[in-house]
Amino acid sequence: MSFHNVRLPEFMAVFAVGVVEFSTSCVQTASGRELRNPDRLNANHKYLLKNCRLNTAQFTCFNNFFRARCGQNHAFRFRDMADYQVTEQVIATGDGITQEFCLYKSYDDVIKSYRRRIAKPVEGSVTVYIKEADNLIETKADINHEHGIINLITPLPVGQLLLADFAFDNIVRFSGDRLEYSYSNDGSIELAPLELLEVIN
């Protein structure tokens, strides 16, 4: 995957409309009953940048960003301002052997929770804890920020919980190679809507 480790400017992120999209096949039987099967287990994320009106400095920054990515050719980081932080997330339960764990975010529900793999934590944002009785004890760990992996110095003891706080970005790309914009009389520059598509790492 062609990936540039740079984040879309946050002044653009505030214009984003987020979309969480699953894919489900629905078949109706002769009796009228409906059978539903997931085409994939995980949701894809999309973002539509719309109603973007920028000042000259902002447009210069974004124009440079778009050209450097060559349109849809290079993926990049994007911060979903509505969903980018996790606090005291349970990552795993110890088995006394495993030292390496992937970062996840859980979306809790009374019937079935959804677990989302996090591949791009923000560097310096990850704090790791081990829960002992009712206490959270901060513990040292090596964090692979390129793949979202926690490496403990020693195996996680049997039955103990591993938790983490962190911020994260999504990996996205532009859906096309075209940037349209227009200059307004008030000096602002308006962009035509742009779509960002999640890239699975």
Image (tube, helix red, strand yellow):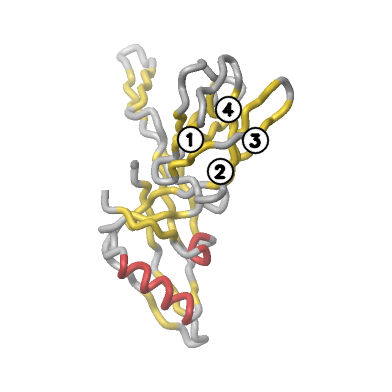
Residue visible at 44% across and 59% down? 7
The image quarter in which residue 74 lies: bottom left
Residue 54 appears left or right of 128: left
Q: Is tag 1's residue or tag 2's residue first in the polypeptide sequence?
A: 2
* Residue 33, image x, y percentages: 38, 15
Pointer 2 with pointer 3, Cβ within 8 A: no
Vertical side of 40 occupied by 200: above or below: below
Q: Which residue is mark 2?
A: 126
Label 2 or label 3, whichever lies nearer to me, is 3
Labelled disc at residue 65: none
Q: Is tag 1's residue or tag 3's residue first in the polypeptide sequence?
A: 3
- Depth check: give the residue in front, 77 or 123: 123
Q: Which residue is mark 4?
A: 162
* Residue 21, image x, y percentages: 42, 39
Circle 3 SS class: strand
Circle 1 SS class: strand
Labelled disc at residue 138: 3
Quadrant location of the C terminus in the rendered image: top left
* Residue 45, image x, y percentages: 42, 44
Pointer 1 with pointer 2, Cβ within 8 A: yes
Vertical side of 116 occupied by 159: above or below: above
Vertical side of 15 occupied by 142: above or below: above
Q: Is tag 2's residue or tag 4's residue first in the polypeptide sequence?
A: 2
Residue visible at 56% across and 32% down? 107
Amino acid of disc 2? Val
